[in-house]
Every structure is written in C-alpha cells, then in structure tokens.
C-alpha cells in the first residue's frame, strides 16, 4: 500500500522487467530479489498472449503488456516493422529517414530488438543508415545482427562490423570481394535464387529463416528496409507486422511496402489489427500470421 492506504500500481518499468523474464516456453515469470521491485509481483502470460498481474498495473504498464505480451508468448515470432509517413513513404528520394516517427516509436523498436534473438536488415538499409541495431532506449539484451549482403558490397567501417556490443552475422554467397574477410563463423553462405515473378533475386525468406534456426535463432525481427520487409510479407513468412504511421506528408520518396499487383480488392490482405497510440504516431499491430504458409 502507498500513502493513505492507496495501492501502489505496477509501473511500466516493472512490467517491462517482468515481461522480459517471461519464458516463451512456460509463459510465466515472477520478480526476484535481484529485480528493482521487491514486492514479489507476479506476471503470467499464456500461449495466446493474454496476461495477468498479481498487482494492479498503471495505465502505462497495462498498455505495454497489451502490446508486447502477445509477441513474447510466441516462441517462433517473425515480426516485420515499418515506420512510414501518411503517404506511405519511409524515406526521401535521397534516402533520408531520420526520423519519420517520433521518440515513442523509436522506443517501441528498441523494445522489439530486446525481445528477439536476431534482427535482420538488408544491405541497402545498412549502407544508407549505418545503424547499430542495438538496444539503447530501454533495458534489454542486444540481439544478433543479421545482414543480408549477397554481393559482399558493404564496407568494413560500418557500425555493424566495428561495434562489438553484439554479434553480427552476414548472409552472403560464397565469399568474394569485400566479404572474403568475414570470419567463417560470422558468415552464412546461401545460394541466391533466380528472379521471381516480382523481380526479386537473392535469398528467399524461407532459406534465411531456416539458416537462422540452424544458428539457434528462432525469434526474428525483420527491421528493414521496405523491400526486405515486403519480401518476407509477400512470402507469407511473417507472423506479425508493425506499421507505425506518422502525421507527416513527404510527397515523394521510397515506398514503405511493395507487393505484387492485384486485380481486385478481394485479393488484398486484410489481417486482424490492433491500434496503439505512440505519442503523435499510430501503430497498426497486424496479425499477418493468419496468412502465413510453411511452404
């Protein structure tokens, strides 16, 4: 109890600590003496993502658990994420994208990184943004960084190669050129596929996921860019998709998602959706797993 008998609410920080300690196998966790909350607060999460706290949550804690508990409950989570303008752009024509969405959405992205085993990014995004792909905005473990670089064109001075706070794996063809210097244990060699009906060539999403599972990496964030996320969505390899829309009009620039042409709106994807307000931005949490295939 707090002052005057008012119950002390579970804070967002405590809820986050509890959620990160939830085992995706047992879907249950509780605080211990090593946590900053010593009241023995207990969190239970079932396999569908429904949660129950032993104490009353604050509004921020409730919102956090509503958003992330369904993600933590899935041991084979493959989640894509896009931050876009109202007119569906993720960057200007010259590739500038820092930052389309606001601080609350950046924290959401860092929470996603903290909840997965690996974060996957295409070579074009790494070259344009030089990201670190680490967890800095919230407490949490850094995921393994997985860079899709079939042609070995990325320079060695980029942050994902120089920053040693997290492991970096490069998915590539047989090493040639720049990627010949990548250590064998940090390299996944895959054959590249012929262009498909959408004009894509390179590695298939299924091949990438299978290779990562071979490394013990099951919970995967497909962070970018738009083409990489689109390929995983088109291949029905995602279980979930986060699309955050900022109240911003860019007018021209790089598209968020690029999918094959359809002839009728009946062919459009309309997955179950939950909405969350993140500051001035609006997050669409899409359950695209209902369209998923294992082929």
Image: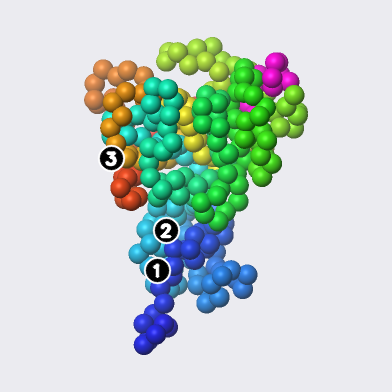
Observer able to see residue 91: yes
The image quadrant that residue 283 belongs to is: top left
What SS does tag 1 mark? Answer: loop
Task: Inspect the magenta stretch and tell me whether residue 171 lies in it.
Answer: yes
- Vertical relation: 115 (above or below) 40: above
Percent position of residue 234, x then y:
42, 26
Distance, label 2 to label 3, CA atoms, is 25 Å
Residue, x 39% and y 22% (percent of image)?
93
What SS does tag 3 mark? Answer: loop
- Vertical relation: 179 (above or below) 211: above
Q: How many marks?
A: 3
Q: Residues within 10 Å of mark 3 (few under 14, many from 20)?
A: some
Residue, x 75% and y 28% (percent of image)?
184
Q: Which mark is residue 247?
A: 3
Percent position of residue 84, x then y:
36, 35
User: Which residue in the structure is indicated by mark 1?
Assistant: 57
Is tag 2's residue or tag 3's residue first in the polypeptide sequence? Answer: 2
User: Which residue in the structure is indicated by mark 2?
Assistant: 65
């Amino acid at each position: 109890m707090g002052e005057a008998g008012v119950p002390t609410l579970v804070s967002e920080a405590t809820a986050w600590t509890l959620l990160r300690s939830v085992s995706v196998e047992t879907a249950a966790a509780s605080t211990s003496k090593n946590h900053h909350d010593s009241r023995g607060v207990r969190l239970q999460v079932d396999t569908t993502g429904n949660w129950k706290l032993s104490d009353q949550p604050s509004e921020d804690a409730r919102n956090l658990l509503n958003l992330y508990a369904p993600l933590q409950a899935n041991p084979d989570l493959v989640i894509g994420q896009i931050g876009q303008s109202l007119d569906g752009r993720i960057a200007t024509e010259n590739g500038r994208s820092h930052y389309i969405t606001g601080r609350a959405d950046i924290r959401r992205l860092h929470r996603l990184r903290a909840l997965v085993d690996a974060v996957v990014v295409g070579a074009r995004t790494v070259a344009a943004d030089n990201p670190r792909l680490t967890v800095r905005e919230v407490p949490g473990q850094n995921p393994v960084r997985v860079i899709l670089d079939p042609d070995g064109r990325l320079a060695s001075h980029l942050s994902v190669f120089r920053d040693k706070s997290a492991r970096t794996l490069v998915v590539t063809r047989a090493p040639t050129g720049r990627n010949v210097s990548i250590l064998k244990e940090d390299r996944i060699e895959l054959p590249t596929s012929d262009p498909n009906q959408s004009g894509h060539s390179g590695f298939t999403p299924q091949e990438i996921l299978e290779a990562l599972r071979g490394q013990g990496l099951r919970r995967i964030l497909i962070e970018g860019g738009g083409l990489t996320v689109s390929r995983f969505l088109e291949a029905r390899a995602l279980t979930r998709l986060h699309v955050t829309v900022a109240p911003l009009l860019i007018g021209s620039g790089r598209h968020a998602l690029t999918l094959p042409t359809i002839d009728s709106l009946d062919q459009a994807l309309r997955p179950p959706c939950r909405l969350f307000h993140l500051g001035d931005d609006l997050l669409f949490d899409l359950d695209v797993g209902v369209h998923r295939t294992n082929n």
